[in-house]
Amino acid sequence: MIKPFRIAQKELKYIYENAQARMEYNPKRSAKATNIVNNHPHFNTQKEALEFAVEQMKTNYARYQVWAKVEKGEDDIYRVQNWWLSTDDSKVLESAEYIGLVQTHDESMILSIIDNNIPIDDVVAYY
């Protein structure tokens, strides 16, 4: 069984708050980064994004990663939302980082899933 990254509240807070500050400081770059990410294929669930990334790595030998959006709840709890993208595009990765997305599966995890023939359903979901 493969477990996605477990991310502490303080790390999610750091990602979220730093992205918010960068976006406020540089709205033009923020808009461009948001546009790049929004125009990239994204998925409703982590499972869909992971399936896509696994398929791409199997067929294209690309180095895919899975990213998700960090949101702050009304209770001041930072969460990873059901908003996922899979990419190996450096421009998208840079934009994802800039606007506050967090990496949930990297290429080494995806390769481990492929190499060990692990069904996607056996991969623990990130909450």
Image (spheres, rainbow, N blue to C red):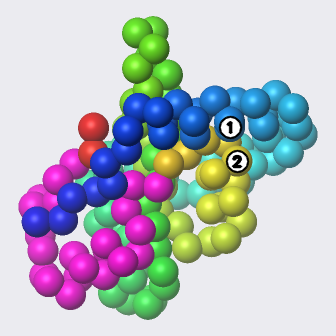
Residue in the image at 40% along x and 20% along y: 77
Locate residue 42, reporting x and y percent. 48, 52
Q: Earlier in the sequence, mark 2 or mark 1?
A: 1
Q: Name the amino acid, label 2.
A: Tyr
Q: Nearer the viewer, residue 36 or 76?
A: 76
Magenta-highlighted residues: 103-125
Q: Name the amino acid, label 1.
A: Ala
Locate residue 47, reporting x and y percent. 26, 55
Q: Residue furthest top?
A: 74
Image quadrant of residue 78? Answer: top left
Secondary structure beneath label 1: helix
Residue in the image at 50% along x and 48% along y: 102
Is residue 84 shown to the viewer in this render? yes
Q: Quick check: is 58 in the magenta stretch? A: no
Residue with the mark numbered 1: 19
Side of 84 relative to 89 (left or right) = left
Residue with the mark numbered 2: 98
